[in-house]
Image (cartoon, grey):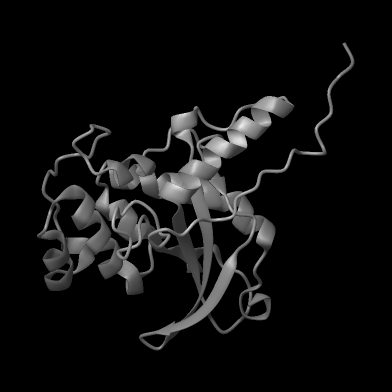
């Protein structure tokens, strides 16, 4: 992958949080032009399905198919909320803080795909929104660390998500920011009866948080 794209893992890690937060906020405000601008054209139909389901605008997909994207107009749609009447999965789309709301997996799954005669490297990571716990705390003692890890594990088992970006491969093998866009966002697994996690029914994930070893404190 690195030979074809010039991929820099540090660049990915530095940008994944802003990309995830940005698309979540675009979805909650139903900012369709932004979503389609940030995503690869090969996946516009997938994003149209997702936004259509969340917003309740069943005409969105047909608009994308019949009209060039730049000429498409979007109706004023009812904004999703955190009300109890909404599907519980939607609460994970609301991100309060760029720095503290979401925990990501420390591994990236890379897959090479060919779509409509174009080649892509997709880069996927798991994500868990922990705003219901107040976000990532600045400091935890040993006892609270164990309690926090247990609470996050419970959320991960119920509301694990998968966020994917993709790089469109060109011929020069030099990294180009314009080729790196949104690919997919999986909020749930259709096989899951409760439809709140990408995990299959009864399946659990392995979750661990390690204390940082490179934090220093000034002497008082």
198 in relation to 127, above or below = below
Residue ranking furthest to the top: 220
Q: Position of residue 25 (x, y in %)?
A: 36, 42
Q: Residue at x 48, y 63 (%)?
A: 165
Q: Is residue 109 left or right of residue 181?
A: right
- In the rendered view, does 13 fall on the left or right side of 219? left
Task: Report the number of numbered marks.
Answer: 0
Q: Is residue 169 left or right of residue 116?
A: right
Point out the residue furthest to the front here: 202
- The quadrant of the image that shows the C terminus is top right
Tell me where residue 6 appears, x and y as whole percent. 66, 72
Furthest residue to the bottom? 117
Residue drawn at 24 percent across, 55 percent down: 51
Nearest the eye: 115 or 137: 137
Residue 113, image x, y percentages: 47, 82
Name which residue lies at 27% across and 58% down: 50
Where is residue 209, by image quadrant?
top right
In the picture provided, is 160 more to the left or to the right than 106? Answer: left
Q: Estimate the x, y position of residue 56 in percent, counting from the top left.
A: 14, 50
The reply to whether residue 213 is visible in this rendering is yes
Residue 139 seen in this snapshot: no
Residue located 64% across and 55% down the image: 106
Quarter of the N terminus within the rendering: bottom right
As drawn, 41 above or below 76? below
């Amino acid at each position: 992958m690195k030979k074809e794209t010039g991929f820099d893992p540090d660049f990915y890690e530095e940008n994944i949080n802003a990309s995830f937060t940005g698309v979540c906020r675009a979805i909650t405000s139903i900012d369709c032009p932004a979503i389609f601008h940030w995503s690869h054209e090969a996946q516009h139909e997938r994003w149209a399905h997702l936004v259509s389901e969340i917003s309740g605008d069943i005409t969105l997909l047909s608009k994308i198919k019949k009209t060039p994207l730049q000429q498409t107009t979007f109706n004023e749609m009812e904004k999703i909320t955190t009300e109890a009447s909404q599907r519980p999965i939607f609460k994970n789309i609301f991100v309060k803080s760029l720095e503290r709301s979401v925990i990501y997996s420390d591994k990236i799954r890379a897959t090479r795909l060919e779509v409509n005669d174009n080649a892509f490297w997709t880069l996927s990571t798991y994500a868990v929104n922990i705003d219901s716990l107040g976000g990532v705390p600045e400091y935890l003692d040993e006892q609270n660390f164990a309690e926090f890890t247990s609470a996050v594990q419970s959320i991960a088992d119920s509301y694990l998500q998968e966020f994917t970006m993709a790089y469109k491969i060109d011929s020069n093998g030099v990294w180009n920011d314009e080729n790196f866009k949104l690919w997919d966002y999986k909020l749930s697994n259709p096989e899951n009866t409760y439809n709140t996690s990408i995990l299959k029914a009864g399946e659990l994930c392995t979750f661990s948080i390690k204390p940082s070893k490179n934090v220093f404190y000034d002497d008082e």
